[in-house]
Image: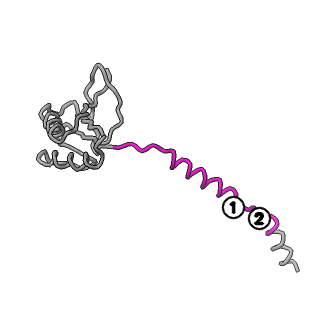
Amino acid sequence: MSKRQNTAEEEQGAIDLTPMLDVVFIMLIFFIVTATFIKIPGEDVIKPEATQSELKATSILVAINANDEIWIAKDKVDERQVKLTLERLYAENPKGWLVIQPDKKASIEKIALITEAARKIGIEKVSVATEKS
């Protein structure tokens, strides 16, 4: 009989965790739904300083690192493929902005190359990201 009494006591002392798990899942869903996702160009760059800077909603991010390598949508892109890559991304979102994030040591020729390719495609909203001084 002692075995029956022990199991009965254990069942009475058990805590039902179902309501707590429900609350945890609801909180998890809430945080996932309300989280903002940041688009990353794929390469960390040190931005040059400027006297005026604005933050715009973007859809296409292009980074140019210190070695003049071009990164679009987390992929390293050859300068001959820049126009094709921008065309594909612009076709996905024709209302989007193009933001160029050059490193301080990046050459102005690469910025001009990307800007020229964007203008040929028809992207009118092009900006260069800088640090506010």
Q: Quadrant of the C terminus?
A: top left
Dot 1 amino acid type: Thr
Q: Give residue 54's quadrant in the image.
A: top left
Tell me: residue 27, above or below residue 119. below
Tell me: residue 77, above or below residue 68. below
Q: Where is residue 94 in the image (x, y as percent from the top left)?
A: 28, 43
Q: What is the chief secondary structure element of the magenta stretch? A: helix
- Mark 2 to mark 1 CA distance (whole Å): 12 Å
Instruction: Report the residue at 42% width, 44% height from top.
Output: 37
SS state under label 1? helix
Instruction: Report the residue at 30% width, 46% height from top.
Output: 93
Using the image, tell me which numbered label, if any, was put on residue 123. Answer: none
Residue at mark 2: 14
Instruction: Report the residue at 29% width, 45% height from top.
Output: 42
Q: Give residue 116's quadrant in the image.
A: top left
Q: In this view, does 92 lie to the left or right of 120?
A: right
**Start and end of the magenta stretch?**
11-39
Q: In this view, does 93 lie to the left or right of 120?
A: right
Q: In which quarter of the image is the N terminus?
A: bottom right
SS state under label 2? loop
Q: Where is residue 45 in the image (x, y as percent from the top left)?
A: 27, 36
**37 inside magenta stretch:** yes
Instruction: Report the residue at 14% width, 40% height from top.
Output: 120
Between 66 and 117, the residue placed more toward the observer is: 117
Tell me: residue 29, above or below residue 113. below
What crowding class fits label 2: few (fewer than 14 Cα within 10 Å), some (14-19), or many (20 or more)? Answer: few
Dot 2 amino acid type: Ala
**35 inside magenta stretch:** yes
Tell me: residue 54, above or below residue 12. above
Residue at mark 1: 18
